[in-house]
Image: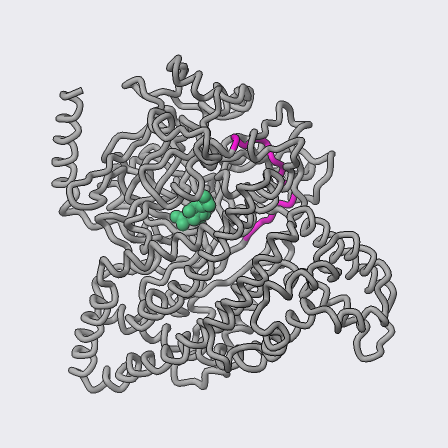
Amino acid sequence: MMKKTLLTLILVLSFNGLFASTPPDEGIWIPILIEKYNIKLMQEKGFRLTAEDIYSVNRASMKDAIVNFNGGCTAEFISGSGLLITNHHCGYGQIQNHSTLENDYLTNGFWAMSREEELPNPGVTVTLLKYMEDVTEKVLKDISDDMPAEERDKLISSRIADIQAKAEQGTDYRAVVRPFFMGNQYFLFVNETFRDVRLVGAPPSAIGKFGGDTDNWVWPRHTGDFSLFRVYAGKDNKPADYSPDNVPYNPAYYFPVSLKGVQEGDFTMVFGYPGTTSEYVPSYHIDMVKNHINPAMVSIRTSKLEIIDRAMESDPLIRIQYSSKKAGISNAWKKWTGEILGLEKMNTIGKKQEFEARLTDWIEADNQRKLRYGDILPKYSEVYEGLKEYTLVNNYTGEVFNGIEAIVLARRTYELASLFQGGKTPDQKTVERTREVLSAYAERFFRNYDRATDQELFSTLLSLYGETLDRKWLAPEYLKLKATANGDFKSLAPKFYDSSVFTDKQRFDSFINGFGKSSLKKLEKDPFYMLAIDVSRFLGANVLPELTRLTNERQTLNKRYMTVQMEYDSTRIFYPDANSTLRVAFGNVMGYESRDAVWFKPVSTLKGIMEKDNPEIYDYNVPARLKELYANRDYGRYGSSDGEMPVCFIASNHTTGGNSGSPVINADGFLIGINFDRAWEGVASDMAFNPEQSRNISIDIRFALFIIDKFAGAGYLLDEMTIVE
Ligand code: ARG
Ligand code: ASP
């Protein structure tokens, strides 16, 4: 025991010494530029393969094994039969959707014991990158910053449309051109999208979401955050709509899975789809986010969560109904809180201001530069004055009215209603189609709807709206309602909720089934409908035009600000902000100092799950079977050499939202983990990466295999994987 502690200490010390001189691991890099910019450093850090192994157009490479999972996450192939692994929280919506009180897959987990048992998920897609290309020249040729903005944008848009059309010609692929470095560079992405994606396996929430929202964004972590899906294709291995006749997709490449595990200091690489970062913004932006937007959003979500948490605790059905919605609300709520703390602690605003002062001196020192760039920062200051207010009004209003579910459904009905507006007699087919889409939406809506909970949300959120925003930003219909209610929305609510068509499935169904001209009158008397329409109209007239103007102006400034930063720091290799395109991050397995005198080790184990066990709390209620395996130390070949069962590990890879589900790859290109989160102290990394404390959290792949095989008895799934012992 003693000896081990000492050894760890020595490792930590020498380790810190070793990496003090190498550059920090900040950066989310472009796959086709790895050869040029990164491979040398990656190899110095321990990587044993080449840039071609990561991305190649000439042969199978890692990129052929990685998909964008349903727009918001990453997933990767781990077999030649289309088996995909991603996070539990990425498949959460699907797992929840298949769950009922009788078959509660959220609580109990789900394992298809044969291909026939795999569950289809209509609407879910995965997208594979076929190739990418730098098209900056083609997009920006002969375009200068002096051109009138409108003319520039038009020219750029039409060139992009041409490039995309050409790339798609004669293929089933979708092409998209995306701006990088705020529009200083453009890349083309050619993608293939698969539409038959089936659920194969998910652990119970007490494993896949262990620690719930309490442990979310926090290290040390013990969450087995993984789930399995399978991609199906037509007999030609091409994307196809769901059909029982489809066959498992055969990817050009899939990841071998390593049982070797990780040691502190090991090289790791994360290859996936990071969503958004804002690393090059001026201090004004940080001020807006940290001091204005985040606090307001955190506060309103705190109120929402109080209501939803109480309801979920009170009733197992409500727990299922609201679990997915709640996870979403809570996730950003907590991240925003962490960002405020992190930005404060790092003094990001102060540091940016110092940088801006230095930059300004440098700009002023040269007349040409002054002419070209001298106006950027003063203009930013002005633009952000406006943005602060308009963004807050827009986001807060959205947060209020998207939080009242009856209003969300009412807004959905607008399309059907609009077919009949102005005395029109619509085409019967259009009516049918619109009604079908709406019915399908309402079906799922009511399955996950609890009227009493929504009623509480209604009165609380409407009160907050009036208390938080200046009166001039409140929609007229709201003010009318408030006057009628004498400010007491709580007393008003039952009347609305007991009679509206948007709060009851039967009322809703019969209303839209018989929908016709006369239905409009009923809608005009419905408070939810009237609020929905009026708020949209009000925002459209009074907020969005100015917000759009300011946003466009900021975009123009962003491009120039990026240029001047690159010119000022001309020897630095910049990485572009995340923009939901495929990227590479690399680093090493590494602990960190959480606070004074507290050093966090980089690996967590099953022991920690047992320490957190608490049958009283849903999120910490360790399944009996897992306790049994622990008691018997029955880890099979998945345990580590010291007899422990590893669960999660952290490393210094730069990641963000969207990277969830990304493969974590070792020096030999084998899969060692699935990325799923970041550690609390470094969570502001979307705006300021902190090499001391920014860590990505991954589930150790051995824990996932242990759960599949030993816990769930679905070991047959391992037969199709390539396992490297
Ligand atoms: N924080 C992680 C991410 O941003 C995981 C969230 C899912 N887990 C949860 N408890 N809500 O997506
Ligand atoms: N949990 C995030 C995701 O879902 C990852 C992160 O923000 O670190 O993509």
Nearest to the observer: residue 499 or residue 150: 499
**Residue that appears at 29% across and 40% down:** 651
Which quadrant of the structure image shows residue 462? bottom right
Residue 455 at x, y percent in the picture: 62, 58
- Is residue 500 found left or right of 566 in the rendered image? right
Dominant secondary structure (helix, strand or loop) of the stretch shown in magenta: strand
- Is residue 576 found left or right of 454 in the rendered image? left
Residue 496 at x, y percent in the picture: 69, 63
Residue 632 visible, this angle: yes
**Residue that appears at 52% across and 69% down:** 397
252 inside magenta stretch: no
Nearest to the observer: residue 590 or residue 161: 590
**Residue that appears at 51% across and 79% down:** 473
Residue 570 at x, y percent in the picture: 22, 66
**Residue that appears at 37% across and 46% down:** 217
201 inside magenta stretch: yes
Q: Is residue 146 above or below residue 497?
A: below
The total of numbered circles placed on residues is: 0
Residue 64 visible, this angle: no
Q: Which residues are magenta?
A: 191-204
What colouring style does the render use?
Answer: one colour
Residue 568 at x, y percent in the picture: 22, 71
Image quadrant where one finds the N terminus: top left
Nearest to the observer: residue 455 or residue 67: 455
- Is residue 572 found left or right of 127 in the rendered image? left
